[in-house]
Structure formats: C-alpha cells, structure tokens
Image (cartoon, rainbow, N blue to C red):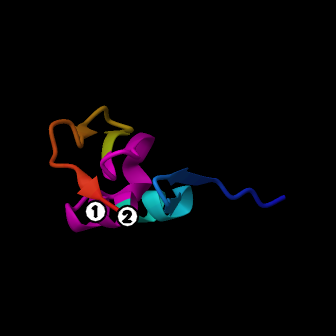
Amino acid sequence: MEIKVEVQLYEKNVKIADVKALVIKDMQSNGIDLADVDTLDIYYKPGTGSIYYVATTIDKKIYGVGNRPLHI
C-alpha cells in the first residue's frame, strides 16, 4: 500500500515526501551519514513554510538543533 500525505494551507500544497527529501538533502550536504541516523524528527510549519529537523545518530550525536530553517 502506498500512502501520500499532503498539507494544504492558503492555496499552497506541500507533499510530505518533498519535505522529507529536502531534509535528507540538507543532512547529506552537512556531512551526516544517513546510515548512522537512529531517529529523525521533522517539524514543518505550514504558515511560514519553515522546516526544522533533529537527527540523532546511533552513537547519540545530535544534529539539527538550532539550525536555520529550511523552506519549501
């Protein structure tokens, strides 16, 4: 089963898959090895289009706290 989730607000549609892809691209550009990530929390603010994330690695390093927001 394939599930697609889309957020709609003020005539703007944002696919959750696009949010996830943007976060992963940012993580890779910051040198985060995706294979080492244990948990990834993504926060999307549809009113501003801001995206924040916190990634915790298997060895408990934390990335993304206090980062500038991404925008979609």
Q: Residue at x 74, y 56 (%)?
A: 3
Quadrant into which the C terminus falls: bottom left
- Label number found at residue 26: 1
What amino acid is at disc 2? Leu
Image mark count? 2
Element assignment for label 2: helix
Q: Residue at x 64, y 53 (%)?
A: 5
Residue 12 position within the rendered picture, expressed as x and y whole percent measured from the top left:
47, 61
The range drawn in magenta is: 23-51
Q: Residue at x 44, y 58 (%)?
A: 19
Q: Are marks 2 and 1 in contact (CB under 8 Å)?
A: yes
Q: Nearer the viewer, residue 38 or 46?
A: 46
Residue 31 lies left or right of residue 16; in this view the side is: left
Image quadrant where residue 39 sits: top left
Residue 27 lies left or right of residue 18; in this view the side is: left
Q: Nearer the viewer, residue 70 or 23?
A: 70
Q: Residue furthest right?
A: 1
Residue 11 position within the rendered picture, expressed as x and y whole percent measured from the top left:
49, 60
Answer whether residue 36 is magenta in the image: yes
Pointer 2: what residue? 22
Element assignment for label 1: helix
Residue 46 position within the rendered picture, expressed as x and y whole percent measured from the top left:
40, 47
Residue 2 lies left or right of residue 31; in this view the side is: right
